[in-house]
Image: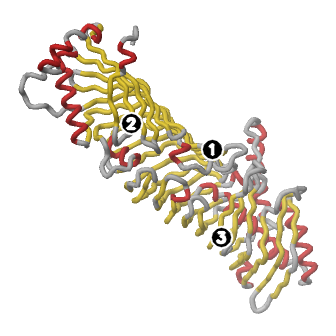
Amino acid sequence: MTPRTRRWIGFLAVAGLVVAVFVSLALRIPLSSENLRARVVATLADRLDSEVELGELTLRVFPRLHAVGTGLAIHHKGRRDVPPLISADKFTVDADLLGLWRRHVAYVRLDGLKIQVPPGQHHEDDPEKEAAKDAKSLPLAIQAGHVAAGRQVVIDVVEAPESAVIIIPRNPEKTPKTWSLHTLRVHSVGANTAMPFEAQLTNGVPPGQIATQGSFGPWHRDDPGHTPVNGAFTFKDADLGVFKGISGILSAKGTYTGRLETIDVRGETETPDFMVSISGHKVPLRTKYHAIVDGTNGDTTLERIDASFLNTSLVAKGGVYDVKGVKGRRVSLDVAMNPARLEDVMKLAVKTPQPPMTGALRLKTKFELPPGDQDVVDKLRLDGDFAIAGGRFTDTDVQRKINEMSVRATGKTGDGGATPKVASDFSGRFALGNDVLTLQRLTFNIPGAVVELNGQYVLQRETLAFLGSLFMDAKVSEATTGWKSVLLKMVDPLFRKNGQTVIPLKIGGTRSAPSFGMDVGRVFKRGS
Protein backbone atom coordinates (compact mmCIF):
# COMPACT_ATOMS: atom_id res chain seq x y z
CA MET A 1 0.00 0.00 0.00
CA THR A 2 1.20 3.53 -0.66
CA PRO A 3 3.14 4.27 2.54
CA ARG A 4 1.66 7.70 3.27
CA THR A 5 -1.72 6.07 4.02
CA ARG A 6 -0.49 3.89 6.90
CA ARG A 7 -1.15 6.38 9.67
CA TRP A 8 -4.94 6.10 9.40
CA ILE A 9 -4.81 2.51 10.61
CA GLY A 10 -3.81 3.52 14.11
CA PHE A 11 -6.47 6.17 14.34
CA LEU A 12 -9.13 3.58 13.56
CA ALA A 13 -8.03 1.84 16.74
CA VAL A 14 -8.98 4.98 18.66
CA ALA A 15 -12.41 4.83 17.07
CA GLY A 16 -12.66 1.23 18.23
CA LEU A 17 -11.71 2.24 21.77
CA VAL A 18 -14.51 4.78 21.69
CA VAL A 19 -16.92 1.91 21.32
CA ALA A 20 -15.10 -0.10 23.97
CA VAL A 21 -15.60 2.73 26.43
CA PHE A 22 -19.26 2.92 25.55
CA VAL A 23 -19.84 -0.80 26.08
CA SER A 24 -17.98 -0.91 29.37
CA LEU A 25 -19.97 2.01 30.74
CA ALA A 26 -23.21 0.56 29.47
CA LEU A 27 -22.69 -2.39 31.80
CA ARG A 28 -22.27 -0.17 34.84
CA ILE A 29 -24.69 2.76 34.67
CA PRO A 30 -28.45 3.24 34.24
CA LEU A 31 -29.76 2.95 30.69
CA SER A 32 -30.83 6.57 30.37
CA SER A 33 -29.66 7.68 26.93
CA GLU A 34 -28.65 11.16 28.09
CA ASN A 35 -26.95 9.84 31.20
CA LEU A 36 -25.09 7.24 29.17
CA ARG A 37 -24.13 9.78 26.50
CA ALA A 38 -22.72 12.19 29.08
CA ARG A 39 -20.71 9.48 30.81
CA VAL A 40 -19.31 8.20 27.49
CA VAL A 41 -18.23 11.72 26.51
CA ALA A 42 -16.61 12.37 29.90
CA THR A 43 -14.77 9.05 30.01
CA LEU A 44 -13.51 9.32 26.44
CA ALA A 45 -12.28 12.85 27.06
CA ASP A 46 -10.35 11.65 30.11
CA ARG A 47 -8.93 8.46 28.62
CA LEU A 48 -7.95 9.99 25.28
CA ASP A 49 -6.95 13.38 26.73
CA SER A 50 -9.13 14.92 24.04
CA GLU A 51 -12.28 16.97 23.56
CA VAL A 52 -15.20 14.74 22.57
CA GLU A 53 -18.53 15.49 20.96
CA LEU A 54 -21.38 12.99 20.68
CA GLY A 55 -24.86 13.64 19.34
CA GLU A 56 -27.61 11.13 20.01
CA LEU A 57 -27.07 7.74 21.61
CA THR A 58 -29.66 4.97 21.83
CA LEU A 59 -29.33 1.56 23.42
CA ARG A 60 -31.32 -1.67 23.23
CA VAL A 61 -30.30 -4.56 25.48
CA PHE A 62 -32.60 -7.46 24.49
CA PRO A 63 -32.51 -9.82 22.71
CA ARG A 64 -28.97 -8.62 21.90
CA LEU A 65 -27.22 -5.45 22.83
CA HIS A 66 -27.63 -2.98 19.98
CA ALA A 67 -26.51 0.63 20.20
CA VAL A 68 -26.53 3.46 17.69
CA GLY A 69 -24.68 6.76 18.06
CA THR A 70 -24.49 9.81 15.82
CA GLY A 71 -22.34 12.89 15.51
CA LEU A 72 -19.11 11.55 17.02
CA ALA A 73 -16.10 13.91 16.91
CA ILE A 74 -12.79 13.67 18.76
CA HIS A 75 -10.64 16.82 18.85
CA HIS A 76 -7.11 17.34 20.04
CA LYS A 77 -7.34 18.94 23.48
CA GLY A 78 -7.36 22.73 23.15
CA ARG A 79 -7.04 22.54 19.36
CA ARG A 80 -10.13 23.91 17.71
CA ASP A 81 -7.98 25.47 15.00
CA VAL A 82 -7.73 22.11 13.24
CA PRO A 83 -10.46 19.65 12.20
CA PRO A 84 -11.32 16.76 14.55
CA LEU A 85 -8.88 13.88 14.51
CA ILE A 86 -11.71 11.36 14.16
CA SER A 87 -15.34 11.92 13.21
CA ALA A 88 -18.18 9.58 12.25
CA ASP A 89 -21.69 10.38 11.14
CA LYS A 90 -22.96 7.20 12.76
CA PHE A 91 -21.68 4.17 14.64
CA THR A 92 -23.47 0.90 15.31
CA VAL A 93 -22.60 -1.66 17.98
CA ASP A 94 -23.84 -5.26 18.16
CA ALA A 95 -22.96 -7.65 21.00
CA ASP A 96 -24.39 -10.64 22.83
CA LEU A 97 -24.53 -11.17 26.59
CA LEU A 98 -22.08 -14.06 26.58
CA GLY A 99 -19.57 -11.99 24.66
CA LEU A 100 -20.01 -9.05 26.99
CA TRP A 101 -19.37 -11.33 29.95
CA ARG A 102 -16.02 -12.10 28.29
CA ARG A 103 -15.59 -8.37 27.56
CA HIS A 104 -15.89 -8.95 23.82
CA VAL A 105 -17.98 -6.83 21.47
CA ALA A 106 -18.95 -8.81 18.39
CA TYR A 107 -19.24 -6.10 15.74
CA VAL A 108 -18.90 -2.35 15.24
CA ARG A 109 -19.71 -0.38 12.10
CA LEU A 110 -18.55 3.21 11.54
CA ASP A 111 -20.43 5.10 8.80
CA GLY A 112 -19.08 8.36 7.38
CA LEU A 113 -15.76 7.89 9.13
CA LYS A 114 -13.21 10.64 8.55
CA ILE A 115 -9.69 10.50 9.93
CA GLN A 116 -7.94 13.85 9.56
CA VAL A 117 -4.28 13.35 10.37
CA PRO A 118 -2.43 16.50 11.47
CA PRO A 119 1.34 16.96 11.11
CA GLY A 120 3.23 15.07 13.82
CA GLN A 121 5.39 16.61 16.53
CA HIS A 122 9.02 15.58 16.91
CA HIS A 123 11.78 15.99 19.45
CA GLU A 124 14.56 14.75 17.21
CA ASP A 125 16.81 17.50 18.55
CA ASP A 126 16.25 16.30 22.12
CA PRO A 127 16.89 12.55 22.55
CA GLU A 128 15.89 12.65 26.23
CA LYS A 129 12.40 13.89 25.39
CA GLU A 130 12.09 11.27 22.67
CA ALA A 131 13.13 8.48 25.05
CA ALA A 132 10.78 9.71 27.77
CA LYS A 133 7.91 9.79 25.31
CA ASP A 134 8.63 6.21 24.25
CA ALA A 135 8.80 5.07 27.85
CA LYS A 136 5.36 6.34 28.78
CA SER A 137 3.49 5.73 25.52
CA LEU A 138 2.90 2.02 26.01
CA PRO A 139 1.51 2.24 29.56
CA LEU A 140 -0.83 5.02 28.48
CA ALA A 141 -1.95 2.99 25.50
CA ILE A 142 -2.79 0.08 27.76
CA GLN A 143 -4.68 2.39 30.11
CA ALA A 144 -6.74 3.67 27.17
CA GLY A 145 -8.16 0.21 26.66
CA HIS A 146 -9.18 -0.11 30.33
CA VAL A 147 -12.21 2.04 30.86
CA ALA A 148 -12.45 0.65 34.36
CA ALA A 149 -10.49 -1.75 36.51
CA GLY A 150 -10.19 -5.20 34.98
CA ARG A 151 -9.53 -6.60 31.56
CA GLN A 152 -9.78 -4.47 28.45
CA VAL A 153 -12.75 -4.67 26.10
CA VAL A 154 -11.91 -6.24 22.73
CA ILE A 155 -13.93 -5.61 19.58
CA ASP A 156 -13.98 -8.70 17.40
CA VAL A 157 -14.63 -6.89 14.11
CA VAL A 158 -14.69 -3.19 13.17
CA GLU A 159 -15.85 -2.14 9.70
CA ALA A 160 -15.73 1.33 8.17
CA PRO A 161 -17.03 1.28 4.58
CA GLU A 162 -16.51 4.27 2.28
CA SER A 163 -14.43 6.18 4.80
CA ALA A 164 -11.91 8.92 4.15
CA VAL A 165 -8.41 9.68 5.34
CA ILE A 166 -7.24 13.27 5.04
CA ILE A 167 -3.54 14.00 5.49
CA ILE A 168 -3.07 17.61 6.65
CA PRO A 169 0.33 18.94 5.45
CA ARG A 170 2.72 20.92 7.63
CA ASN A 171 2.59 23.74 5.10
CA PRO A 172 -0.86 25.41 5.34
CA GLU A 173 -0.52 26.57 1.73
CA LYS A 174 -0.57 22.97 0.48
CA THR A 175 -3.81 21.15 -0.27
CA PRO A 176 -4.61 18.25 2.11
CA LYS A 177 -4.38 14.80 0.54
CA THR A 178 -7.60 12.76 0.65
CA TRP A 179 -7.69 8.97 0.45
CA SER A 180 -10.97 7.17 -0.21
CA LEU A 181 -11.18 3.81 1.56
CA HIS A 182 -13.83 1.63 -0.03
CA THR A 183 -13.56 -1.12 2.56
CA LEU A 184 -11.79 -1.28 5.92
CA ARG A 185 -12.04 -4.22 8.31
CA VAL A 186 -10.06 -4.60 11.56
CA HIS A 187 -10.08 -7.62 13.86
CA SER A 188 -9.48 -7.99 17.62
CA VAL A 189 -9.39 -4.25 18.23
CA GLY A 190 -7.77 -3.50 21.58
CA ALA A 191 -5.14 -1.23 23.02
CA ASN A 192 -2.28 -3.51 24.01
CA THR A 193 -2.17 -6.00 21.17
CA ALA A 194 -1.44 -6.18 17.45
CA MET A 195 -4.62 -5.91 15.39
CA PRO A 196 -5.04 -7.64 11.99
CA PHE A 197 -6.66 -5.58 9.23
CA GLU A 198 -7.49 -5.53 5.54
CA ALA A 199 -8.52 -2.60 3.37
CA GLN A 200 -9.15 -1.48 -0.19
CA LEU A 201 -8.74 2.09 -1.33
CA THR A 202 -8.13 4.35 -4.31
CA ASN A 203 -4.72 5.95 -4.60
CA GLY A 204 -4.66 9.63 -5.47
CA VAL A 205 -1.62 10.14 -7.74
CA PRO A 206 -1.20 8.08 -9.78
CA PRO A 207 -4.81 6.88 -9.62
CA GLY A 208 -5.14 3.14 -9.01
CA GLN A 209 -6.59 0.51 -6.68
CA ILE A 210 -4.73 -0.57 -3.53
CA ALA A 211 -5.46 -3.68 -1.47
CA THR A 212 -3.57 -4.24 1.79
CA GLN A 213 -3.59 -6.59 4.76
CA GLY A 214 -1.42 -6.76 7.86
CA SER A 215 -1.45 -5.81 11.52
CA PHE A 216 -0.73 -2.79 13.68
CA GLY A 217 -0.40 -2.09 17.38
CA PRO A 218 -0.12 -1.88 20.28
CA TRP A 219 -1.54 1.62 19.97
CA HIS A 220 0.54 4.52 21.38
CA ARG A 221 -1.88 7.10 22.67
CA ASP A 222 0.45 10.07 23.21
CA ASP A 223 2.34 9.58 19.96
CA PRO A 224 0.42 7.56 17.36
CA GLY A 225 3.44 7.73 15.08
CA HIS A 226 5.23 5.22 17.34
CA THR A 227 2.57 2.55 16.76
CA PRO A 228 4.07 -0.57 15.06
CA VAL A 229 2.70 -1.59 11.66
CA ASN A 230 3.49 -4.32 9.13
CA GLY A 231 1.77 -5.94 6.21
CA ALA A 232 1.62 -6.52 2.46
CA PHE A 233 0.01 -4.62 -0.41
CA THR A 234 -0.92 -4.77 -4.07
CA PHE A 235 -1.42 -1.77 -6.33
CA LYS A 236 -3.26 -2.24 -9.64
CA ASP A 237 -4.23 -0.21 -12.69
CA ALA A 238 -2.17 2.85 -11.75
CA ASP A 239 -2.38 5.27 -14.67
CA LEU A 240 0.97 7.03 -15.19
CA GLY A 241 -0.66 9.29 -17.76
CA VAL A 242 -1.44 11.81 -15.02
CA PHE A 243 2.25 12.77 -15.20
CA LYS A 244 2.69 14.89 -18.30
CA GLY A 245 5.18 13.41 -20.73
CA ILE A 246 4.91 9.72 -19.80
CA SER A 247 2.25 7.02 -19.87
CA GLY A 248 1.62 3.39 -18.96
CA ILE A 249 -0.39 1.24 -16.57
CA LEU A 250 1.60 0.25 -13.50
CA SER A 251 1.02 -2.59 -11.06
CA ALA A 252 2.96 -3.15 -7.82
CA LYS A 253 3.22 -5.47 -4.85
CA GLY A 254 5.32 -5.51 -1.72
CA THR A 255 5.62 -5.49 2.07
CA TYR A 256 6.05 -2.85 4.76
CA THR A 257 7.14 -2.83 8.40
CA GLY A 258 8.13 -0.33 11.08
CA ARG A 259 6.28 2.43 12.90
CA LEU A 260 3.57 4.64 11.48
CA GLU A 261 5.99 7.57 11.35
CA THR A 262 8.88 5.62 9.76
CA ILE A 263 8.01 2.73 7.46
CA ASP A 264 10.39 0.38 5.66
CA VAL A 265 8.87 -0.62 2.30
CA ARG A 266 10.12 -3.27 -0.14
CA GLY A 267 8.33 -3.98 -3.38
CA GLU A 268 8.38 -4.40 -7.12
CA THR A 269 6.52 -2.80 -10.00
CA GLU A 270 5.69 -3.77 -13.56
CA THR A 271 4.64 -1.43 -16.38
CA PRO A 272 4.35 -3.44 -19.62
CA ASP A 273 3.56 -0.38 -21.76
CA PHE A 274 5.77 2.39 -20.34
CA MET A 275 6.25 5.27 -22.80
CA VAL A 276 7.92 8.66 -22.91
CA SER A 277 5.58 10.80 -25.02
CA ILE A 278 8.33 12.47 -27.02
CA SER A 279 9.27 9.12 -28.60
CA GLY A 280 5.93 7.31 -28.85
CA HIS A 281 7.59 3.92 -28.27
CA LYS A 282 6.35 1.55 -25.55
CA VAL A 283 8.75 -0.64 -23.57
CA PRO A 284 8.21 -3.09 -20.68
CA LEU A 285 9.59 -1.55 -17.47
CA ARG A 286 10.20 -3.51 -14.26
CA THR A 287 11.57 -2.29 -10.93
CA LYS A 288 12.44 -3.56 -7.48
CA TYR A 289 12.83 -1.04 -4.69
CA HIS A 290 13.62 -0.49 -1.01
CA ALA A 291 12.34 2.74 0.52
CA ILE A 292 12.06 4.42 3.93
CA VAL A 293 8.93 6.56 4.29
CA ASP A 294 8.59 9.43 6.76
CA GLY A 295 4.93 9.16 7.74
CA THR A 296 4.93 12.66 9.23
CA ASN A 297 5.52 14.49 5.94
CA GLY A 298 5.46 11.85 3.19
CA ASP A 299 9.14 12.26 2.27
CA THR A 300 10.55 9.02 0.88
CA THR A 301 14.19 7.95 0.96
CA LEU A 302 14.87 5.52 -1.88
CA GLU A 303 17.57 3.24 -0.53
CA ARG A 304 17.85 1.36 -3.83
CA ILE A 305 15.91 0.94 -7.06
CA ASP A 306 16.81 -1.79 -9.54
CA ALA A 307 15.07 -1.19 -12.87
CA SER A 308 15.23 -2.94 -16.24
CA PHE A 309 13.73 -2.47 -19.69
CA LEU A 310 14.56 -4.42 -22.84
CA ASN A 311 18.30 -5.26 -22.47
CA THR A 312 19.15 -2.38 -20.14
CA SER A 313 19.53 -2.28 -16.36
CA LEU A 314 19.93 0.65 -13.99
CA VAL A 315 20.42 1.25 -10.28
CA ALA A 316 19.19 4.41 -8.57
CA LYS A 317 19.34 5.89 -5.07
CA GLY A 318 17.87 9.12 -3.77
CA GLY A 319 14.49 10.32 -2.59
CA VAL A 320 11.16 12.03 -3.14
CA TYR A 321 10.87 15.22 -1.08
CA ASP A 322 8.39 17.94 -0.29
CA VAL A 323 9.15 21.43 -1.64
CA LYS A 324 8.07 24.36 0.52
CA GLY A 325 5.50 26.59 -1.11
CA VAL A 326 5.19 24.43 -4.25
CA LYS A 327 2.55 21.87 -5.21
CA GLY A 328 4.03 18.42 -5.72
CA ARG A 329 7.32 16.80 -4.76
CA ARG A 330 10.90 16.83 -6.00
CA VAL A 331 12.51 13.59 -7.18
CA SER A 332 16.28 13.51 -6.70
CA LEU A 333 18.30 10.44 -7.75
CA ASP A 334 21.80 9.19 -8.48
CA VAL A 335 21.45 6.85 -11.46
CA ALA A 336 23.93 4.34 -12.87
CA MET A 337 23.28 2.34 -16.06
CA ASN A 338 25.58 -0.65 -16.58
CA PRO A 339 25.05 -2.91 -18.43
CA ALA A 340 22.90 -0.95 -20.85
CA ARG A 341 22.23 -0.66 -24.56
CA LEU A 342 22.19 2.66 -26.40
CA GLU A 343 19.36 1.52 -28.70
CA ASP A 344 17.12 0.86 -25.66
CA VAL A 345 17.62 4.36 -24.29
CA MET A 346 17.16 5.95 -27.72
CA LYS A 347 13.90 4.05 -28.15
CA LEU A 348 12.57 6.08 -25.21
CA ALA A 349 13.97 9.37 -26.50
CA VAL A 350 13.55 9.58 -30.30
CA LYS A 351 10.57 9.21 -32.63
CA THR A 352 12.17 7.20 -35.45
CA PRO A 353 10.90 3.63 -36.07
CA GLN A 354 14.37 2.32 -35.28
CA PRO A 355 16.99 3.95 -33.02
CA PRO A 356 19.62 6.01 -34.89
CA MET A 357 22.48 4.15 -33.24
CA THR A 358 23.31 0.92 -31.39
CA GLY A 359 26.06 0.05 -28.93
CA ALA A 360 27.00 -0.79 -25.35
CA LEU A 361 26.28 2.09 -22.96
CA ARG A 362 27.64 3.05 -19.56
CA LEU A 363 26.09 6.09 -17.88
CA LYS A 364 26.09 7.86 -14.53
CA THR A 365 23.96 10.92 -13.85
CA LYS A 366 22.28 13.13 -11.31
CA PHE A 367 18.53 13.00 -11.93
CA GLU A 368 16.38 15.93 -10.75
CA LEU A 369 12.65 16.13 -11.47
CA PRO A 370 11.18 19.25 -9.85
CA PRO A 371 7.46 19.56 -9.08
CA GLY A 372 5.14 21.31 -11.48
CA ASP A 373 2.62 20.75 -14.26
CA GLN A 374 5.10 20.86 -17.15
CA ASP A 375 5.88 17.94 -19.40
CA VAL A 376 8.41 15.57 -17.81
CA VAL A 377 10.90 16.17 -20.65
CA ASP A 378 10.64 19.94 -20.20
CA LYS A 379 11.37 19.95 -16.46
CA LEU A 380 13.81 17.02 -16.20
CA ARG A 381 17.38 17.89 -15.18
CA LEU A 382 20.33 15.55 -15.81
CA ASP A 383 24.04 16.01 -15.17
CA GLY A 384 26.48 13.18 -15.75
CA ASP A 385 28.90 11.33 -18.00
CA PHE A 386 28.60 8.46 -20.46
CA ALA A 387 30.59 6.08 -22.64
CA ILE A 388 29.49 4.12 -25.71
CA ALA A 389 31.50 1.14 -26.93
CA GLY A 390 31.11 -0.50 -30.33
CA GLY A 391 28.63 2.07 -31.59
CA ARG A 392 27.17 1.70 -35.07
CA PHE A 393 24.67 3.88 -36.92
CA THR A 394 21.53 2.19 -38.19
CA ASP A 395 21.27 4.57 -41.17
CA THR A 396 23.33 2.84 -43.90
CA ASP A 397 24.38 6.14 -45.53
CA VAL A 398 25.62 7.57 -42.21
CA GLN A 399 27.49 4.38 -41.34
CA ARG A 400 29.01 4.30 -44.86
CA LYS A 401 30.35 7.83 -44.35
CA ILE A 402 31.84 6.80 -41.00
CA ASN A 403 33.49 3.82 -42.66
CA GLU A 404 34.92 6.05 -45.40
CA MET A 405 36.12 8.59 -42.84
CA SER A 406 38.07 5.88 -41.08
CA VAL A 407 39.71 4.79 -44.33
CA ARG A 408 40.63 8.37 -45.27
CA ALA A 409 41.91 9.13 -41.75
CA THR A 410 44.36 6.25 -41.96
CA GLY A 411 45.56 7.32 -45.42
CA LYS A 412 44.57 4.03 -47.11
CA THR A 413 42.37 5.53 -49.79
CA GLY A 414 44.35 4.10 -52.67
CA ASP A 415 44.97 0.51 -51.59
CA GLY A 416 41.94 -0.86 -53.49
CA GLY A 417 40.66 -2.93 -50.59
CA ALA A 418 37.05 -3.20 -49.44
CA THR A 419 35.86 -0.50 -47.07
CA PRO A 420 35.69 -2.01 -43.56
CA LYS A 421 32.65 -1.66 -41.30
CA VAL A 422 34.01 0.20 -38.31
CA ALA A 423 32.62 0.61 -34.81
CA SER A 424 32.68 3.94 -33.03
CA ASP A 425 33.42 4.70 -29.40
CA PHE A 426 31.96 7.77 -27.70
CA SER A 427 32.47 9.37 -24.30
CA GLY A 428 31.76 12.73 -22.68
CA ARG A 429 29.83 14.77 -20.18
CA PHE A 430 26.22 15.85 -20.63
CA ALA A 431 23.62 18.06 -19.01
CA LEU A 432 19.91 18.20 -19.77
CA GLY A 433 17.67 21.10 -18.83
CA ASN A 434 14.95 23.24 -20.39
CA ASP A 435 14.61 20.83 -23.34
CA VAL A 436 18.30 21.29 -24.25
CA LEU A 437 20.95 18.55 -24.13
CA THR A 438 24.42 20.07 -23.66
CA LEU A 439 27.45 17.91 -24.46
CA GLN A 440 30.96 18.74 -23.25
CA ARG A 441 34.22 17.04 -24.17
CA LEU A 442 32.30 14.69 -26.44
CA THR A 443 34.90 12.33 -27.89
CA PHE A 444 34.17 10.17 -30.95
CA ASN A 445 36.76 7.50 -31.79
CA ILE A 446 37.11 5.44 -34.98
CA PRO A 447 40.22 3.73 -36.37
CA GLY A 448 42.55 6.49 -37.59
CA ALA A 449 40.58 9.46 -36.24
CA VAL A 450 39.24 11.15 -33.13
CA VAL A 451 36.53 13.84 -33.08
CA GLU A 452 36.16 16.13 -30.09
CA LEU A 453 33.02 18.28 -29.86
CA ASN A 454 31.15 20.68 -27.59
CA GLY A 455 27.64 21.88 -28.25
CA GLN A 456 23.90 21.48 -27.83
CA TYR A 457 20.99 19.43 -29.11
CA VAL A 458 17.44 20.80 -28.73
CA LEU A 459 15.11 17.87 -28.07
CA GLN A 460 11.77 19.16 -29.30
CA ARG A 461 13.11 20.87 -32.45
CA GLU A 462 15.80 18.18 -32.93
CA THR A 463 18.39 20.81 -33.96
CA LEU A 464 22.18 20.47 -33.69
CA ALA A 465 24.82 23.12 -32.90
CA PHE A 466 28.32 21.76 -32.28
CA LEU A 467 31.90 22.96 -32.69
CA GLY A 468 35.01 20.81 -32.42
CA SER A 469 38.01 19.29 -34.12
CA LEU A 470 38.88 16.23 -36.18
CA PHE A 471 42.25 14.63 -35.37
CA MET A 472 43.62 12.29 -38.08
CA ASP A 473 46.69 10.11 -38.39
CA ALA A 474 46.92 10.84 -42.13
CA LYS A 475 47.78 14.17 -43.72
CA VAL A 476 45.00 16.05 -45.53
CA SER A 477 46.48 15.12 -48.88
CA GLU A 478 46.56 11.44 -47.89
CA ALA A 479 42.82 11.44 -47.18
CA THR A 480 42.00 11.60 -50.88
CA THR A 481 43.42 10.54 -54.26
CA GLY A 482 44.23 11.90 -57.71
CA TRP A 483 44.68 15.57 -58.50
CA LYS A 484 42.95 16.57 -55.24
CA SER A 485 45.69 14.85 -53.30
CA VAL A 486 48.34 16.76 -55.24
CA LEU A 487 46.72 20.15 -54.63
CA LEU A 488 46.15 19.47 -50.93
CA LYS A 489 49.83 18.82 -50.32
CA MET A 490 50.27 22.59 -50.26
CA VAL A 491 47.97 22.98 -47.25
CA ASP A 492 49.19 19.95 -45.28
CA PRO A 493 51.42 22.14 -43.06
CA LEU A 494 48.47 24.40 -42.26
CA PHE A 495 46.59 21.53 -40.58
CA ARG A 496 49.53 19.50 -39.27
CA LYS A 497 50.21 19.90 -35.53
CA ASN A 498 52.28 17.69 -33.24
CA GLY A 499 52.36 14.85 -35.72
CA GLN A 500 48.59 14.90 -36.36
CA THR A 501 46.21 16.54 -38.77
CA VAL A 502 43.75 18.82 -36.93
CA ILE A 503 40.70 20.08 -38.82
CA PRO A 504 38.23 22.44 -37.08
CA LEU A 505 34.63 21.26 -37.51
CA LYS A 506 31.13 22.60 -37.14
CA ILE A 507 27.92 20.57 -37.14
CA GLY A 508 24.45 22.05 -37.59
CA GLY A 509 21.09 21.23 -39.11
CA THR A 510 18.66 18.72 -37.62
CA ARG A 511 18.93 15.16 -36.43
CA SER A 512 17.35 13.86 -39.65
CA ALA A 513 19.35 16.19 -41.92
CA PRO A 514 22.63 17.13 -40.22
CA SER A 515 25.22 19.35 -41.90
CA PHE A 516 28.95 18.73 -41.43
CA GLY A 517 31.65 21.12 -42.50
CA MET A 518 35.03 22.66 -41.82
CA ASP A 519 34.98 25.76 -39.66
CA VAL A 520 37.03 27.93 -42.03
CA GLY A 521 37.09 30.84 -39.62
CA ARG A 522 39.13 28.82 -37.13
CA VAL A 523 41.62 27.47 -39.67
CA PHE A 524 43.66 30.66 -39.67
CA LYS A 525 43.14 31.48 -36.00
CA ARG A 526 46.23 30.99 -33.93
CA GLY A 527 45.71 28.25 -31.34
CA SER A 528 42.52 26.97 -32.97
N-terminal of the pair, mark 3 or mark 2, is 3
Task: Tell me: 521 left or right of 354.
Answer: right
Residue behind mark 3: 188
Task: Tell me: 468 left or right of 69.
Answer: left
N-terminal of the pair, mark 1 or mark 3, is 3
Q: How far from the left and from the top, in percent, is residue 90?
A: 78, 78
Task: Tell me: 509 left or right of 222.
Answer: left
Q: Quadrant of residue 511?
A: top left
Identified at 26% across, 31% down, the residue is: 424
Q: How far from the left and from the top, in percent, is residue 215?
A: 60, 62
Residue behind mark 2: 509
- Residue 321: which numbered mark, if any? 1
Residue 70 drawn above or below residue 435: below
Is residue 503 shown to the viewer in this render? yes
Inter-mark Cα distance, 1 to 3:
36 Å
Residue 260 drawn above or below residue 525: below
- Residue 122: which numbered mark, if any? none
Inter-mark Cα distance, 1 to 2:
40 Å
Q: Outermost residue toward the left?
A: 416
Q: Quadrant of residue 393?
A: top left
Q: Nearer the viewer, residue 206 or 40?
A: 206
Dividing the image into 4 quarters, which one contains the N terminus?
Answer: bottom right
Contact check, label 3 and label 2, Cβ < 8 Å: no
Identified at 47% across, 41% down, the residue is: 316
| Mark 2 element type | strand
Q: How is the protein colored in the picture? A: secondary structure
Q: What type is the residue that disc 3 sits on? A: Ser
